[in-house]
Image: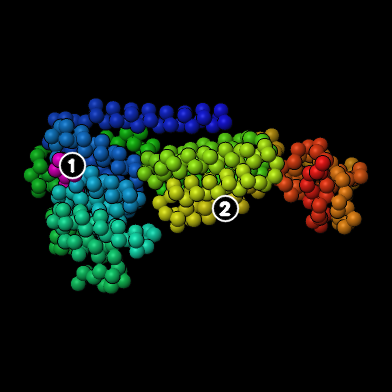
Amino acid sequence: MYIMKILRRTIIAASFLLYLLGSILSISGAEKDADVYVIKLHGEVNGAMVSYLERELEIARQNNQPAIIDIDTWGGIVTSAGDISNILLNTPVETTAYVSNKAISAGVLIAISCDNIAMSPNSYIGAAETIPNTEKILSAWKGMLSTAAIERGRPEDVILAMADVRIVVEDYSEEGELLTLAARQAVDLGVSDALCENISEVIEYFDLGETYSIAPYTTSDKVASAITSTTALDIFFTIGFAFMVIEIFTAGFGVAGIISIVCFVMYFFGGMIAGTAQWWAIGLFVLGIIALTIEIFVPGFGVFGISGIIMCTLALIFSANSFEEFAKRAGFAMIACAVLIPILIKIFGKIKLFDRIANKNVQSVSEGYIISQVKDEIIGSAAISVTELRPTGIIEVDGNRMDALSEEGFIAKGVPVVVSGKRSSSVIVRKQRT
């Protein structure tokens, strides 16, 4: 538990210091004498992008500069897009969206939340369907789009056609397909105000000034963006889950547990920045881990083990954007377990860190091992555990050794057991009851 606390505090402190340093550098590095401040929103829309935009817009406000929001995204997290939209709709800074390449999905909401919109001649905008596309989520998403469109005077029906396949824009889309517009089409339908080759043309067209500076994208911004991306969260979840399973089926606490804790700390920390994980979900997960830890030291798959699994599962469900997202991650994690565990045992079987996972004992007849089929008469016999059972290991019955599987989870070495069943050439055992 002490190692867990140290790791958690170190990661959180380092991430906070990186973010603080990035904020200081971005403020000190801003060119205050420029007429226009350019803020690039490229890549996945997530919590890190929300924080970055909010910080840089504040710099523009302090410098009394209009801001150009350079957009190039395939979309991202709906809640983060909603946060960005609220920031843009409520900021006193004059904002101009410039779609330099693409504004897909969440990028549509970001673009139409700005005061002005310009697009590169080769850019496009649209395909704003939510994933998962349930009626409830779609309705909320359309509400966000409608609010921004009405507030900024954009054609609401055209914008909604980008999110709902049931809405048709004559000559531009058909029922059953999402609307995506090329730059020229967007201008013709009033979604965009102008076609501009570059930032300089945007500044000239909207008469924003003459010179511009570009908001710095610091190391802390890159780190925050990386750990809050859906890909990173998927990786943290999968590795954390896989090594948690390994730790549960091994004795004590070791390297698998440390790896799992680090991955889940990063998963929940990234989720908090992205706005998907709440503090109470993290607390529920910690309680689940505590319950599972107790189960390790209290042999038997009992109330602590079951309640720990339930609490951890609920915490992971609540920290995802949707149950579908959790199910996808859990599916990947289970596949990873099936593939990863045998590979780790094979590759690292000779390393002491993995001695608790792999059974390295050589079973020879000269040492009293029974290789043949187990007979029914052995059931009920008293025995003793020659090795730890995690849950498999070696027992000794009447001077003979054989493979055994514990029906109660972990059993320490040298513990009296009773044979309660058989499995081909191995037996099933439980502790002797007094």
Left or right of 294: which side holds 318?
left
**Residue 75 x/y as whole percent:** 32, 52
**Residue 252 x/y as whole percent:** 66, 36
Secondary element at tag 2: helix
Whether residue 349 is visible here, answered yes or no, is no
Question: How many numbered badges does the structure rendering display?
Answer: 2
- Residue for point 39% across, 46% down: 276
Q: Give the numbered dot on residue 334.
A: 2
Q: How is the image coloured?
A: rainbow
**Residue 299 x/y as whole percent:** 70, 41
Of badges 2 and 1, the one in the foreground is: 1
Left or right of 82: which side holds 433?
right
User: Which quadrant is the C terminus positioned in?
Assistant: top right
For the record, the magenta segment spans: 90-97
* Quarter of the view holding residue 394: top right
Secondary element at tag 1: loop
- Residue for point 53% across, 46% down: 311
Gap between marks 2 and 1, in whole Å? 45 Å
Q: Front-most of 420 and 122?
A: 420
Disc 1 marks which residue? 91
Does the segment drawn in magenta span residue 94?
yes
Does the segment drawn in magenta span residue 80?
no
- Residue for point 81% across, 43% down: 432
Tag 2: residue type?
Met
User: Which quadrant is the N terminus positioned in?
Assistant: top right
